[in-house]
Image: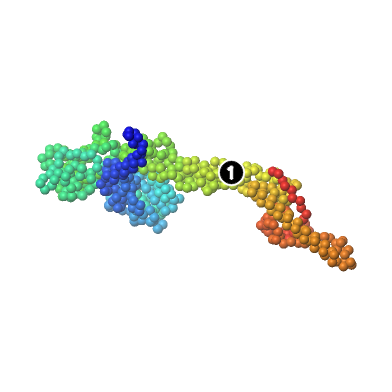
Amino acid sequence: MCFSTWILRNQFLIAIIAILGSAVIVQACDPGWFGSKCQYKCHCSSGNCDGRGECSTGDVCAGGWFGPACQYQDLLSMPGTIATPTASPITDRDDFTCFTSDVNTLTINFIRMYPITWIRFNVQLSDLMKSITLVSADNPDISQRCNMSSRIDDRTMDLFCDNDVIVQELAFYGKGVKSLCSLYISGGRNVALRQSVTQSSTWSDATYPETMSRANNAVDGNTSGNFSHSSCTHTLVNDTAPNWNVTFSTPQLVNRYVLYNRVPNQERLIDVQLSSLNADGTTVFSYTVPNVSLASYSVISPTQPVAFIKIFKPLGNIILTLCEVEVYGDSVCPHKTYGLECDKSCNCENKTETCLVATGACPSGCAAGSYGDGCHSSCPAQSWGPDCLSLCSVFCVNQSCLPENGACVYGCVPGYKGTYCVDACPLRRWGQDCKEYCSDQCLDQTCNRFNGVCNNSSDDRFTYVNGTQGCSCDDRFGMGFGIGIAVSCVVGLVIAGIISCIFKRRHQNAKQDVPDGNRDSANNGPQRLPMHNYDTLNAYDSKGYDKATELNVTNKTSSTGVSEAEPSHYYEIPDIECVRSET
């Protein structure tokens, strides 16, 4: 059997093997990590996530994290942050617990200055989503620098800031504040995790193996300052130029660094220098640790693309120890891409613009038919257009329309026509999509555009052309209804004929029984058919009126002032001749 034949016969088996292989690749990361190189840390409250970093159903981002794959640090949850009034309803990770008092202002004070990149609001009332204004004493023009918004869903909106918006105090005011349920303030994501690192030397002895002081301990996500926890780096005692370096797989847009010190021996980081270089090898930022021993050092830099970071001691023979190096920022993605690894395509209304790297949000809004994170969620039912902000016409059948352009999917309800079902039926047309023609038996061939009932009647009932009143059997609601009228007319005539025969025979019998003295009066008196109860007859009379219409006719007053019921609940059966009209 040739190889190609074997392939054809075993396609199903090959597909199963491929799927299982993919599953193995996805599951290859250590617990608590994900990504193509297992370089992203899970930040779900359970500590576990799927291969894309998503939390399982019912799980949420752990405190201090939010956004796509829970990768963005929430500055509102940082130690020392003070919110006035208390921020507990908006920091409990529950989007359904909201402010209950009439709050119009929310003030946030951080323990230090932070660069902020974007803010996420979740509100109880969607119409108040944009009724929140951002101000800051540190940045008076912040409302102009944080003014691009993106709708995630009916209750959630993101607000994006320009680069280098740095604040320690923020205030939110407006009538939308009292509707706040959750608030997240992004400080970026740690882009240094599990990146490629080196150091000039690695210390070890009989008690502490080399693994306890290797270079990658500073990018393992463990910020403990206890050296015995194998979470710190350590160079040799006699290293004359101790240094530690990180190289990013792709340049990262960086605006903040955090260096975690060893406890004890914090003095070892004093005078240590940090230099950041771009892809060309040009230094774009430098920092020297001050002459003060701290557990950690937080450093703000101008937002710059960084490809390489070097941390070193300018003077030799001093041990360099780093327990964690966090670098906050985001990816530098090619045009029209976004995401942790720039592997997602923007879906903007303006096809020439690029979207924001964190969420895929677009300055022009999502392309028609989409909304949400990355603009890749399809519009909910009965909505359409950019960001799904437009509603389908109420005159679309089931109010259902195409999410891209609002065109009605199943046509229009009776009385309307057109792509969007906003045009009323033209004269002499009626019904769904105005496909029906008014009967030519209607005066001027005009009728109600919703149900085809003839117009121009003085009593708001049907009006027909001369010679067709009565059992015209005309099709006023379509062929089916016309057939119904025809059948009703025939039945009515049969009943009328039977009744006439019965009374004629009774009249003849009565005539035979009349005494001679009264026979003349019987012969000469007016002959009048007896009155019959309307309810005992067919539902339609000779004029084609139905019972429901007949019973709701209001009394009219004649010129003589006598009240006339038109027509009466009781009436005589006239001699009629059914005329069939051909339409």
Across and down, in percent, residue 431 comes to 61, 46
Quarter containing the N terminus: top left
Crowding around mark 1 (Cα neighbors within 10 Å: few <14, some 14 to 19, many 20+) is many
Across and down, in percent, residue 496 comes to 74, 57
Quarter containing the C terminus: top right
Across and down, in percent, residue 479 comes to 65, 47
Q: Is residue 463 above or below residue 239?
A: below
**Residue at position x 47%, y 47% from top?**
381
**Residue at position x 44%, y 51% from top?**
126
Would residue 181 appear left or right of 202 to someone viewing this image? right
**Closer to the camera in the image, 25 or 130:** 25
**Residue at position x 16%, y 48% from top?**
227
Would residue 197 appear left or right of 425 to someone viewing this image? left
**Closer to the camera in the image, 125 or 485:** 485
Q: How many marks?
A: 1
Across and down, in percent, residue 383 comes to 48, 46
Residue type beneath disc 1: Asp
Write down the quadrant of residue 429 in the picture. top right
Q: Which residue is mark 1?
A: 433
Q: Is residue 96 above or below residue 39?
A: below
Would residue 131 appear left or right of 291 to someone viewing this image? right
Residue at the far front: name it. 1
**Residue at position x 59%, y 47% from top?**
414
**Closer to the camera in the image, 235 or 167:** 235
Q: Is residue 419 visible?
A: yes
State the SS at label 1: loop
Residue at the far top: name it. 280
